[in-house]
Amino acid sequence: MSDLRGSRILGFGHFQPERVLTNDDLARMVETNDEWIRSRTGIRERHIAGPDDTVYTMGAAAARAAMDDAGVTNADLVVLASTTATDRSPNTAGRVVAELGLDGAAAIDVNTACSGFEYALGLAEQSVRLGTANTAVVIGSETLSAITDWTDRSTCVLTADGAGAVVVGSDPVARISPVVWGTVPGLTDAVRVDGDPQRFSQDGRQIMRWALKDAVGIARRILQTAGVTLDDIDVFAFHQANRRIIEPLVKALGVTDRQIVIHDIEVSGNTSAASVPLGLSKAWHRGELPRGGRALLFGFGGGFAYAGQVVELPE
């Protein structure tokens, strides 16, 4: 049996489609305007997939960038989180393995919607810690535009496409905390992708009430499980659902001006499972995040599932 060891993040990568859809563009498609969208969501623009942008091609591009950043050329595990993958088989992680030319890597798909990346990272952390994988690529990739009802102004202003990824490797010290994950059975139907054709819908008021009432307690439990305090955290990377959820959560936690809060939703929209790694990767590659600092990751949404962990950033 393998001796337990730790794991760490080695690198970040991301990909966004070229097409940018602004609020003014949306105003020509549905009854809305820039002020209405910004005041209710914080979003001013989002990226939309082109004909050649799929969940697996975007995921592979983000993974390749993360591997380059980490300085690794191979991996023996790929875990991909998405709620918009179209094929049952081969699974999307398997397509990424083939696209990257990885030699026989294990491939796992995860679908817990907006908390998917944190679930996937939890699985990868456990695999590396237990020795069943040495190097893992963890991806969140979504084409939410494909399941958007572009006549519904309450949801079409939110959704966007993109991918983010990290590479996880072994370390003598645990630099990724155990995942805290779970579901809220009473909110199972609060976020849905169903119908024919399948379309995204949600009960925004229910989600907002949960976020303001219960999310803070879960975030604190993530910190407790990691054995750190709020003061130990340098970066807060929450699911980019809506600025009106992120800001009250930050305030309720007592985040200070010294600490960094990811607000990628302004220019990337809500990309579900991709939102946390996408926002982190963009900030990392802009040089905005402290090397060796600690980040609190927290995703929540469809299912109604949530997950989070504390990670140390690469040094």
Image (cartoon, helix red, strand yellow):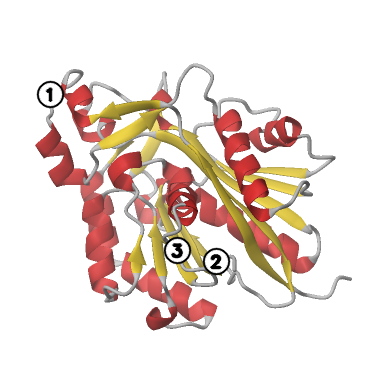
- Among the 4 quarters of the image, the one containing residue 31: top left
Mark 1: few/some/many CA within 10 Å (<14, 14-19, 20+): few
What SS does tag 2 mark? loop
Q: Residue at x 41, y 31 (%)?
A: 144
- Among the 4 quarters of the image, the one containing residue 312: bottom right
Distance (Cα) linking label 3 and label 1: 38 Å
Name the residue nearer the viewer: 41 or 284.
284
What SS does tag 3 mark? loop
Q: Residue at x 45, y 63 (%)?
A: 289
- Among the 4 quarters of the image, the one containing residue 34: top left
Residue 246 vertical placement versus 173 (above, below) = above
Amino acid carrying label 1: it is Glu
Q: Are marks 3 and 1 in contact (CB under 8 Å)?
A: no
Q: Which mark is residue 289?
A: 3
Q: State the image coordinates of residue 211 (x, y, percent, origin top left).
A: 29, 60
In this picture, residue 239 sits left or right of residue 36: right
N-terminal-most mark, 3 or 1 = 1
Q: State the image coordinates of residue 25 (x, y, percent, origin top left).
A: 22, 23
What SS does tag 1 mark? loop
Q: Looking at the image, can residue 269 be seen? A: no
Distance (Cα) linking label 3 and label 2: 8 Å
Q: State the image coordinates of residue 91 (x, y, percent, origin top left).
A: 67, 33
Amino acid carrying label 2: it is Leu
Q: State the image coordinates of residue 226 (x, y, percent, origin top left).
A: 53, 77
Q: Are marks 3 and 2 in contact (CB under 8 Å)?
A: yes
Residue 182 vertical placement versus 191 (above, below) = below
Q: Quadrant of the C terminus?
A: bottom right
Amino acid carrying label 3: it is Leu
Q: Which mark is residue 313?
A: 2
Q: Residue at x 49, y 16 (%)?
A: 51
Q: Which mark is residue 31?
A: 1
Name the residue nearer the viewer: 256 or 65.
65
